[in-house]
Image (spheres, rainbow, N blue to C red):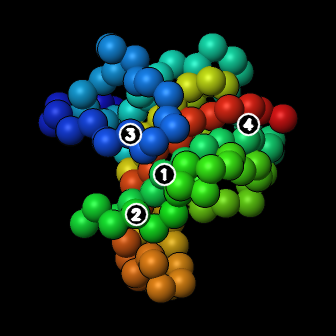
Amino acid sequence: MADDKEVKFPELPAGAGKMDAAAPKALTTTPSGLKYRVLREGKGAKPKATQTVEVNYHGWLDNGKVFDSSYKRGESISFGLNQVIKGWTEGMQLVGEGGMIELEIPASLGYGARGAGRDVPPNATLHFLVELIDVK
């Protein structure tokens, strides 16, 4: 279900590709509570939860603090979609290869009450900008 509220587009990190001019201004909420918008339509296949993806990503908290970024490291990363937080598993199946997606992941689909290390506090909402490079 698309929300009516317009949300400012994320600032693209250095090295990110361009968004589509027609990218939606509002996020869509899935039944699980995941919020997303496809910022660039991919031309390739959408991954399944059992596949491995290669991505570039940029993650931040509600306060804008960046907690992880493959762009800052200067290299993409590959992983199985069934080996990551639920919000990633669900969200990455919504964009095609070559696409870009923005994810807003509630704590229940992220790291929950435990948080993640010193950078992600308990019950944090996670924000990601992700470019899907390859589906394997």
Q: What's the amino acid at mark 3?
A: Leu
Which residue is the site of mark 3? Answer: 12
Q: Do the residues labelled 2 and 1 touch (CB within 8 Å)?
A: yes
Q: What element carries label 2?
A: strand
Query: Which residue corresponds to the image point at 33% horizontal and 66% vertical from the top-left?
Result: 65
**Reading the chain from its start, which is encountered first: label 1 or label 4?**
4
Decide if residue 80 is on the left or right side of residue 11.
right
Instruction: Measure the C-alpha gap from mark 2 to mark 1.
Output: 7 Å
- Disc assigned to residue 66: 2
Location of residue 102 by image quarter: top left
Which of the two discs, 2 and 3, labels the residue nearer the N terminus? Answer: 3
Residue 58 numbered mark, or none: 1
**N-terminal of the two: label 4 or label 2?**
4
Q: Disc 3 on helix, strand or loop? A: loop
Q: What distance separates the C-alpha of mark 1 from that of mark 4?
A: 22 Å
Q: What residue type is labelled 1?
A: His
For the image shown, how many numbered marks are present on the structure? 4
Identify residue type, mark 2: Val
Label whose residue precedes the other's in the sequence (4 or 3): 3
Give neighbour class at mark 3: few <14, some 14-19, many 20+ (Cα, 10 Å).
Answer: few
The numbered dot on residue 48 is: 4
* Residue 94 seen: no
Mark earlier in primary sequence (3, 1)? 3
Name the side, left or right, on which 51 lies relative to 22. Answer: right
Q: What residue is shown at x 28% (from left), y 61% (from top)?
A: 64
